[in-house]
């Protein structure tokens, strides 16, 4: 049975796909090292060895479900860089408030480069408890996220 959650749509859009879940904050730079510094544009294997949930999973075109992102301020540039390479994620779903690192990269890339990463925050802790990697996700323009 599907569960429905309502968040705040920061960059709205409609999308269906599969969830990739990180219960710990997602480190954008550490997760995309092979792409950013190795030039890989075919796949985007997560290179963050400290993220046991996502390590080696393909992030290309993913719907990332996480509490927040973490890392250096380069994380914002990393988001723009992987989108430029064509291996970025399609959506970021945050259980809590979006953090400044993710907001900077996602919003600037949308405004400057017209590359929309659907972004919803404030989905709540229940969202992150309910969603599992591989679950079908349906995102609506109004910030509604259906899991299952």
Image (tube, helix red, strand yellow):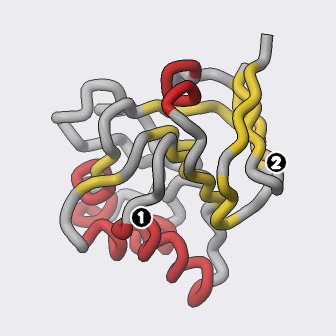
Question: Which image quarter is the N terminus in?
Answer: top right
Confirm whether residue 62 shows in the render. Answer: no
Q: Secondary structure at mark 1?
A: helix
For mark 1, does the 10 Å Cα neighbourhood hold few (<14), some (14 to 19), or many (20 or more) residues?
Answer: many
Q: Is residue 62 above or below residue 115?
A: above
Q: Viewer-proximal residue, 95 or 62?
A: 95
Q: Secondary structure at mark 2?
A: loop
Q: Is residue 53 above or below residue 74?
A: above
Instruction: Answer with the quarter of the image where residue 110 lies.
Output: bottom right
Q: Is residue 147 above or below residue 11?
A: above
Residue displayed at 52% across by 23% down:
133
Q: Is residue 52 above or below residue 25?
A: above
Q: CA distance from mark 2 to mark 1?
A: 20 Å
- Extreme residue toward the top, this view: 1
Q: On the image, numbered disc 1 is attached to which residue?
A: 102
Confirm whether residue 79 shows in the render. Answer: yes
Residue 144 coordinates in the image, percent (x, y): 77, 43
Q: Viewer-proximal residue, 122 or 52?
A: 122
Residue displayed at 55% across by 36% down:
124
- Extreme residue toward the bottom, this view: 112
Q: On the image, numbered disc 2 is attached to which residue?
A: 140
């Amino acid at each position: 049975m599907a569960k429905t959650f309502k968040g705040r749509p920061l960059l709205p859009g409609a999308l269906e796909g599969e969830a990739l879940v990180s219960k710990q904050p997602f480190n954008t730079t550490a997760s995309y090292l092979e792409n950013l510094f190795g030039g890989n544009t075919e796949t985007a294997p997560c290179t963050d060895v400290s993220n046991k949930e996502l390590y080696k999973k393909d992030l290309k075109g993913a719907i990332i479900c996480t509490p927040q992102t973490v890392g250096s301020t380069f994380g914002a540039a990393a988001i723009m860089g992987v989108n430029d390479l064509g291996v970025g994620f399609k959506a970021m779903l945050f259980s809590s408030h979006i953090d400044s690192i993710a907001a900077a990269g996602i919003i600037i890339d949308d405004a400057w480069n017209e590359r929309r990463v659907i972004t919803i925050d404030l989905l709540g802790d229940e969202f992150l408890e309910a969603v599992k990697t591989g679950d079908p996700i349906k995102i609506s323009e109004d910030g509604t996220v259906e899991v299952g």
